[in-house]
Amino acid sequence: MAKVTFNEDRCKGCGLCVTACPKKIVQLSNRMNSKGYHPAEITNQEACIGCASCAIMCPDTVITVQMK
Amino acid sequence: MDFKKTKGLTDAPLHYCPGCTHGIIHRLVAESLEELGVLDRTVGVASVGCSVFTYNYFNCDMVQAAHGRAPAVATGIKRARPDDIVFTYQGDGDLAAIGTAETVHSAARNENITIIFVNNAIYGMTGGQMAPTTLPNQITQTSPYGRDVTVVGYPVKVCEMLSQVDGASYVERVAVNNVKNIMKAKKAIKKAFQNQIEGKGFSLIEVLSTCPTNWGKSPADAIKWLDENMATYYPLGVYKDKEATKND
């Protein structure tokens, strides 16, 4: 199983990870981070296949993927 | 797969706009240098434009060159310190406009350096003016009715031009608009650095990139626009590889 973590305060809410996720389980959250952006979050950790597409697409290296 | 931030990048937050693909290209360069084990003997040359602050982001020695002169500065560093790995990181306003002469002549001399050329078809830092690489009919701040090729001429195709220069060793165009293309871009960039380590000479990787802010598009629309417009005018692929054609 894969664990995806977002370094939320570095996220600029561009949403490129949302377009890259083949499982459609990444979305922009409703809350705001310290920069005033809506950071990306994962909606269903169980469904993640650990492909790291979101991390590869992220311009700000916000995302870390760990296989367990 | 496991994925964590490369040691080739510092912890400084990137100043680029949300969705700007500069960050992806930074990561690919940094990962390549880390994987090749040359970070501690690499000197990067920053250019003028949005990428002017790259010296804050790459975890290696950096120099900042005058507008367009990065290949000339890199030539000097490489010749003085031949064991160092020297690369330039330049945008299209820097490399394809004011720096055309330096680029063409460093290729003609087959300088053993690596050039990362980021083409986003616009001047980003100065507010979205028409660049040498702006597509025909593309709307910018200084071409509000679209680029009129009868008045300002046609875009400069850097890879096609350099493929005709005898000195150039390796010239490839890649894009960073989806995961598949990013993987290919990584491979090309790593090969360009590998070439330099092996002393094969001048390598240039042109990376098609987005500028969501100045294109007036969302980041998601910008990567789509790149695919539909830029990638058709600037076809992806290897334009020159001396090593591959040597045995033909």
Image (tube, coloured by chain):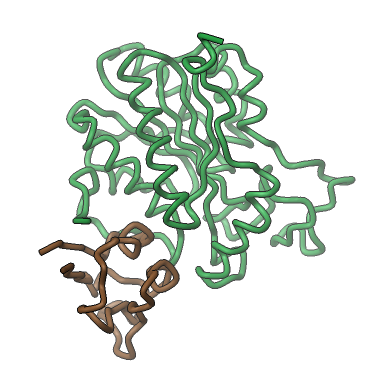
Chain colours: A brown, B green
**Residue A23 position (above or below residue B16):** below
- The one of B37 and B156 positioned closer to us in this rendering: B37
- The one of B65 and B115 positioned closer to us in this rendering: B115
- The one of B223 and B180 positioned closer to us in this rendering: B180
- The one of B221 and A2 positioned closer to us in this rendering: A2
The answer to whether residue B154 is left or right of residue A24 is: right
Is residue B240 visible in the rendered image? The answer is: yes
Quarter location, residue B107 = top right
Quarter location, residue B215 = bottom right
Residue closest to the far bottom = A30
Which residue is rendered at x = 37% and y = 21% of the image?
B195
Which residue is rendered at x = 25% and y = 72% of the image?
A48
**Residue B191 position (above or below residue B81):** below
The answer to whether residue B60 is left or right of residue B89 is: left
Q: How many marks?
A: 0
The answer to whether residue B84 is left or right of residue B195 is: left
Residue closest to the far left = A68
